[in-house]
Image (cartoon, grey):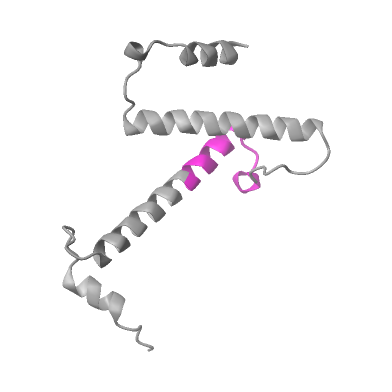
Amino acid sequence: MAFIKRMMATCFRPAAARRKQSPQEAYEAEKRRWVADQMGRILEARMRPYGDRGLVDVSRYGCINLELALSYEFDRRWWFGQTARLLSEAETASKSEGSSHKIHPTISTEESSPAKKP
């Protein structure tokens, strides 16, 4: 119930009271939202015996608190996504003409040359 009240209060905050979140605050807010969503899905699936409804498999974390396991899973997915995004940005930046990002010559030659077989 407190969660619903808090959520409703944030919906109706005046625009002047809102401020831009730092990246860390945005990360924490998204993490809390995702964990709460997954907790709801898992609890609903426990009450209804059909389908997995896109649930996250947290069996890799063993017998720890479900919320903590979901938190670890979110961190794993978040950092994988961030790494993939940065790699794709670096790849497109290196291929674009007139790019302000310079790539070290040895790195660019390693990427362009085929792998040597031992």
Foreground: 98 or 6?
98
Residue 111, relative to residue 97: is it above or below? below
Q: Main secondary structure of the magenta part?
A: helix
Classify residue 105 by image quadrant.
Answer: bottom left
Return the residue found at the far right. 49
Residue 69 falls inside the magenta stretch: yes
Q: Quadrant of residue 66 in the image?
A: top right
| In the displayed structure image, the side of residue 73 where residue 113 appears, left or right | left
Residue at position x 74%, y 43% in the image: 52
Residue 65 visible from this viewpoint: no
Q: Residue at x 75, y 35 (%)?
A: 45
In the rendered image, residue 28, in percent from the top left (x then y), is placed at: 43, 30
Q: Position of residue 89 (x, y in %)?
A: 32, 56
- Up the image or down, 89 lies above or below 76; here it is below
- Tell me: residue 116, above or below residue 26: below
Residue beneath the point at 31% across and 63% down: 91
Q: Is residue 17 visible?
A: yes
> Magenta span covers which residues?
58-77
Residue 48 on image: x %, y %? 82, 34
Observer-nearest of 107 and 5? 5
Residue depicted at 37% across the width and 28% down the height: 25
* Quadrant into which the N terminus falls: top right
Quadrant that contains the C terminus: bottom left
Q: How many marks?
A: 0
Q: Position of residue 79 (x, y in %)?
A: 42, 47
Q: Is residue 80 above or below residue 16?
A: below
Image quadrant in which you'd find residue 51: top right
Q: Using residue 112 as the reference point, say whether residue 53 is left or right of it.
A: right
